[in-house]
Image: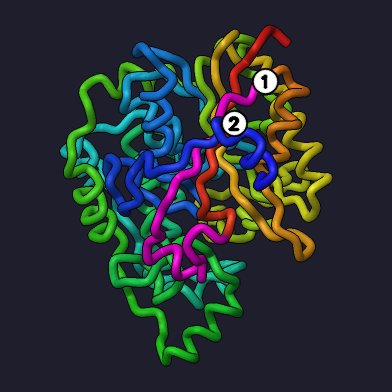
Amino acid sequence: MAELQKQLPEKFVIGEFWTNKQRQGHPLHHTISYRASFKPELPAFFFKEYLNKKKCVVYDPFGGRGTTAIQANLDGHYAIHNDIHPLSIFLAKSRQIVPPLEKLEEKLQSLSLERQYVPEEGDDKLLPFFHPDTLQEIKCFRRQLKEDPSPAMQFLGLIALSRLHGHSSGFFSVYTFPQVSIPPKAQAKNNQKRNQIPEYRAVLPRILKKLKQDLKEKIPPFYHEFSKKNIYSLSSANLIQSILPESVDLIVTSPPFLDKVDYEGDNWLRNWFLDIPTSIDRKPSIYRNLSEWQDFLGEVLQTSSVLMKPKSRLVMEVGEVVNAGETVHLDEWLVDLAEQAGLIWEKTFIQTQNFTKLSHCWKVSNNEKGTNTHRCVVFRKAKVV
């Protein structure tokens, strides 16, 4: 990329295009954390840059926690959210319809959770995190969530999921990391090191507190006009079958950065809560070498090109990663792959930034690692592929 930047400097735009401050977007975005997700200000910037009218169709093939889809609805557009993992579909779809706060409170008050602990198989993995009585309440809530598909219960389920484990008394668990579900043995060691044991923490009051916090800002009145027509697709990004060709006005997404994040392992507690089984057919995209990554992204770009309207654009956020001891500029490889898919490279936005305290938790220095360096490569569809 350094070579390309020297040869074609006019194609690179450097600056602060959106704020790097934490939690500046609508609170609906921050209902739940999700590792390696970009800020809502990123898709919002590109909506303004490339959509010159309302009611466009925005697509994210690597939907994650639903940032692109939710921001699209907040900005007056329809959304298509795709991801290979059922957890991602739940995170996005549970915010498709958000009932009024009073309706959610009424639903919450109607729930009755059993507190007296009843041992079950598999509890040994959960008890390092939860007091037995808290675990019993979680199990009870979990059963009701599975049986009740109503928008109110699904949104409450999202709130409960966000409170499942974390680093303060507002979570159901003893002190642990909020974004990543660490292994039970690691948590047991942490408990011993911190001289802590899980204490009883009531589930419903913590859901209510978080609920009021997340809905303190009103959702735009037109939000549901667009969200109710969203499409939620559970598929690998290179094998989309549920979306019509030439139906997408803009794609804003971020693919996996080689082997940086283990989404399956990092979310095992959330998967348990939502009763999502491990599947050999579901392979989150973690690639150990550049060749595998190129093959997969080439297929994704081919598939995405088919879905795009003529002259529409695709924005892909990538960065630099260290692979096999060498720095790899993923955006440079994208340029070559996109050309084969009938996509023309227009420009690359390089976001200058100072990282927040969460980035420092992961020991990420400013503009050094791909998981926190925003390089948004913009492609335009030249013709029907």
Residue 82 in sight in this render: no
- Residue 343: mark: 1
Identify the magenta region. 344-368
Residue 137 forms part of the magenta stretch = no
Q: Residues within 10 Å of mark 2 (few under 14, many from 20)?
A: many
Q: Alpha carbon of mark 2 to alpha carbon of mark 1: how far?
A: 16 Å
| The one of 379 and 161 positioned closer to us in this rendering | 379
Q: Quadrant of the N terminus?
A: top right
| Left or right: 191 in relation to 134 | right
Question: Is disc 1 placed on a helix, strand or loop?
Answer: strand
Q: Residue at x 44, y 30 (%)?
A: 69
Q: Amino acid at mark 1?
A: Leu
Residue 169 in sight in this render: yes
| Image-quadrant location for residue 152 | top left
Question: Is disc 2 placed on a helix, strand or loop?
Answer: loop
| Left or right: 49 in relation to 110 | right
Q: Residue at x 61, y 53 (%)?
A: 263
Q: Amino acid at mark 2?
A: Pro
- Residue 61: mark: 2
| The one of 32 and 359 positioned closer to us in this rendering | 359
> Of tags 2 and 1, which is closer to the observer?
1
| The one of 351 and 197 positioned closer to us in this rendering | 351
- Residue 11: mark: none
Q: Earlier in the sequence, mark 2 or mark 1?
A: 2
Where residue 317 appears, x then y in whole percent? 55, 40
